[in-house]
Image (cartoon, grey):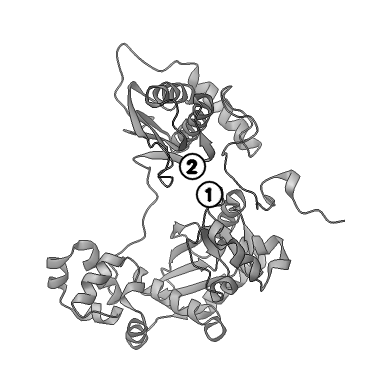
Amino acid sequence: MFALVDCNNFYASCERVFNPNLQNKPVAILSNNDGCVISMSDEAKKLELPFGAPIFKWEQFCKDNNITVLSSNYPLYGDMSARVMNILGDFSPDIEVYSIDESFLQLKGFENYDLKEYATQIRTRISKWTGIPTCVGIAPTKALSKVANKIARSNLKQSKGICVIDSDENRIKALKWTKIGKVWGIGRRLQKRLQAKGIETAYDFTQVSSDWVLKNFSIVEWRLQKDLQGISKIPLEEVSSKKMIATTRSFEYTYSDIDNIKERISTFATSCAEKLRNQKSSCHLLIVQLSSDRHKKDIQQHKASKTVCFSYPTDSTLTIANAAVEAVKTIFKSGIKYKRAGVIVAGLVPNDNYQLNLFLHENPKHKPLMSAIDNLNKKYKSDKIKLANQDLKRTWKMRQERLSPRFTTNINEIIKVT
């Protein structure tokens, strides 16, 4: 059996944990640079505030309906997510963290357990220890556990946040209730192709021939169909090293001077280097991207990238940041207002197994230096040690005019009781 544990309206719920005044009130969370709505509470959904709504167009609507609008507080959300996932690890050793707010648990050897009671224990502990509300769907396969979770979420009062599909009768009933477009892994294009064949529900999808699915689609859709039929074909995914690491961000404002852009690129490159060392990898390639604001058609547009090949694999912040800054100098154009940049490291190899170069190699002083920097930053839970060409006050320069305090990750912003 598989369990899917999903946090309800996660970003909004995190804000409510530390600000009880937001309970039972409409809350909306904005994307980077306070751009558009990416999360909201059930109360805001009932007011029909659309997902992806640009806040500058919906500002008056939010004021008229008393919707509290907040900037994304990623340090808080990341920390709360880690706490929830740590709790889930106590309920099963086989866990797949699917996203920041949901995880799959594989329940091996639970044949004699009361699964509904077990799901209740999961929800109760997470709520008690973190204050985050959750829903739990349990079924014989991952795809069915997704269906069960949606059913639990659709009617919280009746389901109490729990749905268990433990019989073929319950499976068929659940699949007939689920529209094909709501099935995990069915995108808009695939939905249209299936509907053209008369497939309107998840149950309809399970009734067509498996050979037809393989002939017209791919092994991915075939596995999904089998999962929905109750035959487990989608296993838990193991954590593996990434084959490419990217750090891309929109700027707080448009920049037309090279100095600000060099500082941003250096910061992005530093982030990539840290991620490389975390997974004990080094890179052979570096790609630097720079682009203007494509949404502003009245200004001159420019988009370019530069690829740098290293003579030896590296995970050094100094090497990667210097190469990134030199690369952005070659693609920068004077007079262009740039809005977005990115740094990508590719050609990754493990640090303990790669081809050496007879004549060129990393400066031997870099390894102990990077280790010391990482240990200090880890100890103090922030980027205290930076390169001289980085902004010492901020890591990500984003417009966050409605930002709540980082209650759990910054000692200066914890709740004060007076």
**Is the residue marked by circle 2 packed among few (<14), some (14-19), or many (20+) residues within 10 Å?**
many
Q: Residue at x 69, y 67 (%)?
A: 22
Q: Residue at x 73, y 48 (%)?
A: 413
Relative vertical location of residue 279 with respect to residue 238 in this rendering, above or below: above
Q: Are marks 1 and 2 in contact (CB under 8 Å)?
A: yes
The numbered mark at residue 32 is 1
- Confirm whether residue 87 shows in the render: no
Quarter of the image holding residue 131? bottom right
x, y percentage for residue 376? 62, 31
Dot 1 falls on a residue whose secondary structure is helix
| Image quadrant where one finds the C terminus | bottom right
The numbered mark at residue 250 is 2
Dot 2 falls on a residue whose secondary structure is strand
x, y percentage for residue 285? 33, 29
From the viewer's side, name the closer residue of 338 and 71: 338
Please name the amino acid that badge 1 sits on. Answer: Asn
Quarter of the image holding residue 193? bottom left
